[in-house]
Amino acid sequence: MNDTQTPIKYTANDIADRAWDNSDDDYLAFLKMKNYALSVEAELATAREELETERIRLAACGVVAMADTKESRIKAREILPEYRSASLGDVERRVDECIELKEQRDRLAELLPCECIYDSTSPDPTQTCPKCRVLQSLNQPER
């Protein structure tokens, strides 16, 4: 049991034993209670498994979202089929769009040659020409 699971205070047998106290209760009531407790335990186990699967699906979305190159995109998408989801598909499509936009940006930047005498790497905008400033703004991370 990991730290996110709620511990079960009573097992199915504990519940059944409490229902059956050797008094006037009949054995059928005892069996019904025990069966109910067993079914609740089974449902809880199933719910925990489903929750763990959903946690992994969410983590997969995060891993794919961080892929920002064609190479990392391919590696990040090596995911078992049971952990794929519609949300993951949405993230993959958005990552593809972002990578394509970066490639377009880079192709456009190559079309803007700078033939100036200014230092194009200067952080001071007054020391760069307009074309250099465009190139710098294209290479700035999104805010």
Image (cartoon, grey):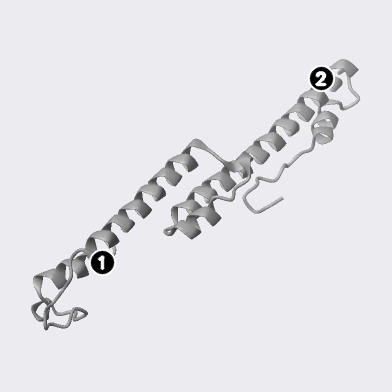
Q: Badge 1: few (under 14), some or many (20 or more) residues near its Cα, within 10 Å? A: few
Q: Looking at the image, which is closer to me, 128 or 52?
A: 128
Q: Which residue is mark 2?
A: 32
The image quadrant of residue 69 is bottom left
Is 40 on the left or on the right of 71, as rendered?
A: right
Task: Residue 61 in the image: state x and y as whole percent.
Answer: 49, 48
Whether residue 19 is visible to the viewer of this picture, yes or no, is yes
Q: CA distance from mark 1 to mark 2?
A: 67 Å
- Please, is residue 130 above or below residue 102 in the view? below
Whether residue 26 is visible to the viewer of this picture, yes or no, is no
Q: Which mark is residue 140?
A: 1
Q: Amino acid at mark 1?
A: Gln
Kindly state the secondary structure of the residue where label 2 is placed. helix
Task: Residue 60 in the image: state x and y as whole percent.
Answer: 54, 49
The image quadrant of residue 3 is bottom right
For marks 1 and 2, the one nearer the N-term is: 2
Q: Look at 41% across and 43% down and name the residue there.
A: 93
Kindly state the secondary structure of the residue where label 1 is placed. loop
Q: Amino acid at mark 2?
A: Lys
Is 133 on the left or on the right of 43, as rendered?
A: left
Is 35 on the left or on the right of 128, as rendered?
A: right
Q: Which mark is in front, 1 or 2? A: 1
Q: Look at 44% across and 52% down and name the residue there.
A: 65
The image quadrant of residue 38 is top right
Q: Looking at the image, which is closer to me, 112 or 85?
A: 112
Q: Looking at the image, which is closer to me, 136 or 91?
A: 136
For the C terminus, the quadrant is bottom left
Q: Look at 56% across and 44% down and name the residue there.
A: 57
Task: Residue 34 in the image: state x and y as whole percent.
Answer: 82, 26
Is 16 on the left or on the right of 66, as rendered?
A: right
Task: Residue 44 in the image: state x and y as whole percent.
Answer: 69, 35
Q: Look at 20% across and 63% down and name the residue there.
A: 111
